[in-house]
Image (cartoon, helix red, strand yellow):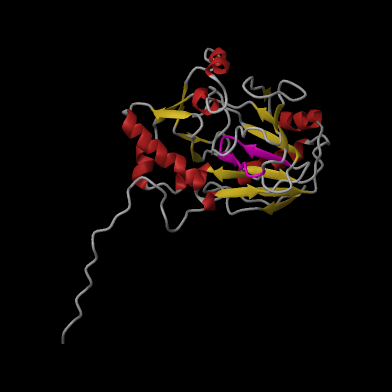
Amino acid sequence: MTTTPLPILRPHRIPADGLYEGRRILRRTPDGWAERPYERFEVVPQAATIGAEIRGLDLSRPLSGALHAELNRALLEWKVLFFRGQHLSSGEQREFASNWGELESNPLLAQGDSKDVVRFDKTAGGAPTFENVWHTDVTFRERPAMGAVLQLREVPPSGGDTLWADMAAAYDNLPGQIRARIDGARAVHDYLPGFARFYSAAQLAPFQAQFPPVEHPVVRRHPETGRRMLFVNASFTTRITGLEEAASDRLLRLLFQQAQVPEFQVRWRWQAGDVAFWDNRATQHYAVNDYGPHRRVAERVAIAGDRPR
């Protein structure tokens, strides 16, 4: 009996640094996490591991201890929470955010009604700013923000969505040899690359002493869940400590790309008065600039965080 010879394939490969196709590991919570029902509001998932709409709450009202605890659990489990049609005043937005800690200001951004309210006002015909890049807020600080509360006050007729990426899922899906390289590694973060896209040297120079470059772990552990998360971003991470420039650039390019995987993302289409509350320790986000020549006005309040470990 004769057998048919196996076909011979030509040599084939994909470069090692890039996005990896195939099955995704999509864990919403850490191993061993105790899932419990929510008793004080409705949770409507928006994606597999990240993003949930919270229904049945008025954020202008004070939070009881039990409600705060349940909302915090939802934040840890879903990483970003959405609330439709809240129409909060700046004071109410600040009050809600302050349930999670001290509020921080950012002298590099336009101020709203108070120093700890940032106002993003993209007017018709204006130059796009602080959009179209995946990033984690203020990682150039020694203690980057724990989270942020963003409200859209004016929305364009279409476009202007925001996306968030789950950086624990991004870490989980890295090849084992890459995880081995970055566990324990540290990287430098600097405000200059992110803001040099929009400001002149004369505008940036006064802040160099206030915001010197800082080092953070490439993989941080979430201080409340203990979960490992990828903690580098294309706005502020400049190099991996101890690597030559070419090797650092190549590895960072690979790591930056992981936020772009759709399975790790949620996308929110805004309506005026909507609020998003995200865990800045566990996510990156991307504001889409596709709404010109219309206007988009948002206000953000940031909550001070801890030193990444």
Q: Is residue 76 above or below residue 112?
A: below
Q: Is residue 234 above or below residue 81?
A: above
Choose top left, top right, bottom left or bottom right for residue 185: top left
Quadrant containing the N terminus is bottom left
Q: Is residue 7 above or below residue 279?
A: below
Residue at (60% x, 33% y) in the render: 130
- Image location (x, y in percent) of residue 47: 61, 53
- Image location (x, y in percent) of residue 282: 56, 38
- Image location (x, y in percent) of residue 256: 46, 39
Q: Residue furthest left?
A: 1
Q: Range of the magenta residues?
A: 275-291
- Residue 281 is inside the magenta segment: yes
Looking at the image, residue 304 sits to the left or right of residue 237; the answer is: right
Residue at (71% x, 23% y) in the render: 111
Question: Nearest the camera: 59 or 128?
Answer: 128
- Image location (x, y in percent) of residue 262: 53, 52
Looking at the image, residue 74 sits to the left or right of residue 207; the answer is: right
